[in-house]
Image (cartoon, rainbow, N blue to C red):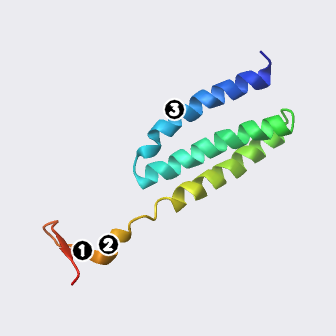
Amino acid sequence: MNRTAKLLAATTLALGAFASAANASCDGRKTTGTVVGGATGGVLGSVITHGSPVGIIGGAVVGGVAGHSIASDNCTGHHYYRHGYYDRYHHWHHYS
């Protein structure tokens, strides 16, 4: 097995481990998105530039930013607050 194949296999295992943690809170999703995006970007940068350190680092940075941004977009699904509110005793009240 060559170096690129080993790197892809290790990244696939790491992505599987991080994907299982993706069901955590929104902050956890952002962190997971950043890490998974950075790892994937680093691997893609390595493959595209044939192992150049600049390609690895550049791919990791771009992938990390993209992963964080994509994960942040999925955290805005709290639209149920528009239809009511919680009081100080944590009881839900619907607007009439």
Quarter of the rendering occupied by the N terminus = top right
Residues at marks 3 and 1, CA–CA distance in whole angstroms: 37 Å
Question: x%, y% of residue 20?
Answer: 46, 37
Dot 2 and dot 1 residues touching (CB under 8 Å) = yes
Residue closer to the observer: 27 or 8 = 8
Q: Residues within 10 Å of mark 1 (few under 14, many from 20)?
A: some
- Asked whether the beta carbons under mark 3 and mark 1 sit within 8 Å of each other, the answer is no
Q: Can you give x and y, in whole percent of width and height, for residue 61 in the image?
A: 70, 49
Q: Is residue 73 above or below residue 55?
A: below
The residue lying at 23 percent from left, 81 percent from top is 95
Query: Residue 78 appears in which quarter of the rendering?
Result: bottom left
Q: Is tag 3's residue or tag 2's residue first in the polypeptide sequence?
A: 3
Q: Is residue 93 left or right of residue 1?
A: left
- In the picture as drawn, the residue positioned furthest to the left comes out as 89
Q: What residue would you read off at disc 1?
A: 85
The residue sitting at 25% across, 76% down in the picture is: 84
| Coordinates of residue 24 in the picture (x, y in percent) | 40, 46
What amino acid type should be assigned to the residue bearing mark 1? Answer: Tyr
Marks 3 and 2, how far apart at CA: 33 Å
Assign a secondary structure to mark 2.
helix
Q: Relative to 94, is 66 on the left or the right?
A: right
Residue 26 disc label: none
52 vs 76: above or below: above
Residue occupying the far top of the picture: 1
**Disc 3 residue type (three-letter):** Ala
Marks 2 and 1, how far apart at CA: 6 Å
Residue 81 bears which disc, if any? 2
Residue carrying label 3? 17
- What residue lies at 75% left-to-right and 23% top-to-bottom? 5
Crowd band around label 3 with a 10 angstrom C-alpha radius: few (<14), some (14–19), many (20+): few
Q: Hey, what amino acid is under mark 2? A: Tyr
